[in-house]
Amino acid sequence: MQHDKVLILDFGSQYTQLIARRVRELNIYSEIHPFNKPPKNVDDYKAVILSGSPMSVRSKDAFHPDLSEIRGKKPMLAVCYGAQYLAHFSGGEVAESNTREYGRANLSLVEEDTFFKNISIGSQVWMSHSDTIKHLPTNGKLLASTHDVQNAAYKIEGESTYAIQFHPEVYHSKDGKQLLENFLVSIANVNPDWTPNAFVQETVEDLQAKLGDDKVVLGLSGGVDSSVAAMLLHKAIGKNLYCIFVNNGLLRKNEFSDVLEQYKGMGLNVKGVDASARFLDALAGLSDPEKKRKAIGNAFIEVFDQEANLIEDVKWLAQGTIYPDVIESVSATGGPSATIKSHHNVGGLPDYMKLKIVEPLRALFKDEVRRVGASMGMDKDLLGRHPFPGPGLAIRILGDITAEKVRILQEVDAVFINGLRDAGLYDKVWQAGAILLPVNSVGVMGDERTYEKCVALRAVESTDGMTADWVNLPYEFLQKTSNDIINKVKGVNRVVYDISSKPPATIEWE
């Protein structure tokens, strides 16, 4: 079944992925492409959205998209930079704002138009720009204003082209989802039929056609992504799926045995491989985060290659790659989105493995993966598991890795995560974990002076990890957790709580 698709052209905004997610919440499939590398056939898309950007349209280095195949031919929504671009280069004027327009604002004028259906004066929107549109472009018609921004929204008469200086994709824009629905469904006539059930049915059919009777090997991690990928493949090819769960020695306490037990009830063909010593040897003496990631990736490939060779005639390697992995791994030279850190599950296979790649979840965001898993009847506790980094505790131990440091962090992490569960807080947190810091601090236990490790606790709330706020955990919980860690984990005498949001910080420390 063919679904209507929406094209999002990325100009480097930190919110671009949120646009895609908001569109998908409307059961409409959307794709992100760098503005300077659009898909070859724009006709495949029913509507186009231009993202914001940290760039100024007044700069000599301003991004110049080729809109000749889009503007006036397809419904187009220009957000922030896109709105300023249309004004600046189409007969209007963009100037530096007297004050940086950032944060919450309220609509003070809303003209009657399908674009603003069910959105009234006073609706809160989110601004994030330092330039402002002084004069609308040729044929521009004002649709909305705020107290400080006269030209907050406009349309081009004679075209299905709309432009806004605020961000409808962020939660702070209270009617942002309604605005996107007005544009996509009411104006662009996009059919909202892209649902989890439809995704499962179509993906299973596609996998059957693609894989035939071939054998597929999949690396299970115990996490949501690889587990949902495994179930989709299991539905498609049954016994021809061979799952391998590698213990890299950097998992949570008892996770290797617990996860293997959990998979038994899912009907999957799973083999557990304990390669802890091999990974710790590969990490010996490494402190740089990227070098640690690469050492873990290389060791994993070696173990996997060894295990895959034990399966006769295996042709494919399945991976739980999801859409943010794909987007964040795009080089800055290939478009405006810069690589923040390398992802463990995108690319990097050596030629000698001779395995083709299959990635059933490559088009999905994390929350969509969970919904797909739920539509297949998967266990809600498994689907509700917090994300856990592929390199495991290696990137939560700052500095070099030793078996003793892993032991300490596993114990600390167990106290923290089990405490969240016992306090009924686990499901209110998107991701949580502990970080072992490369510092010792002075403490007193009994009558003795100690000089031991400091750990940081991290708990964030998010929907997809693209942005995240720290969770305001109750003081009583933090107090109890700190006491339990210091009393139960030998080698730790200080606990701190990380209250940084993303951005500017990242969720993981490395």
Image (spheres, rainbow, N blue to C red):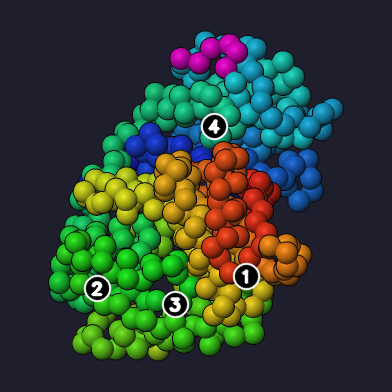
- Up/down of 214 relative to 337, above or below: below
| First of labels 3, 4 by sequence position | 4
Mark toward the start of the polypeptide (3 vs 2): 3
Q: Magenta span has 72?
A: no
Q: Is residue 121 above or below residue 61?
A: above
Q: Give the mark, 2 or 1, whose residue is nearer the N terminus.
A: 2
Does residue 424 appear anywhere in the picture? yes
Q: Residue at x 24, y 45 (%)?
A: 375
Indicate the amino acid at tag 4: Tyr
Residue on which the image places disc 1: 491
**Can you tell which quarter of the image residue 489 is in?**
bottom right
Judging by the rendered image, the residue that carries numbered circle 3 is 248
Of 38 and 1, nearer the camera is: 1
Report helix, strand or loop for mark 1: loop
Please report the bounds of the magenta region as a residue range: 118-123
Q: Are marks 2 and 1 in contact (CB under 8 Å)?
A: no
Dot 4 falls on a residue whose secondary structure is loop
Secondary element at tag 3? loop
Q: Residues within 10 Å of mark 4 (few under 14, many from 20)?
A: some
Spot occupied by residue 440 in the image (x, y as percentages of width and height) = 73, 68
102 or 279, nearer to the observer: 279
Relative vertical location of residue 242 with respect to residue 181 in this rendering, above or below? below
Q: Secondary structure at mark 2?
A: strand
Q: CA distance from mark 3 to mark 2?
A: 16 Å
Whether residue 350 sits left or right of residue 77 in the image: it is left
Nearer to us of marks 2 and 1 is: 1
> Would residue 388 be found to the left or right of residue 491 on screen?
left
Query: Which kind of residue does numbered mark 1 sit on?
Result: Gly
Q: Amino acid at mark 3?
A: Asn
**Number of numbered discs visible in the structure rendering:** 4
CB under 8 Å between discs 2 and 4: no
| Pair 1/3: label in front | 1
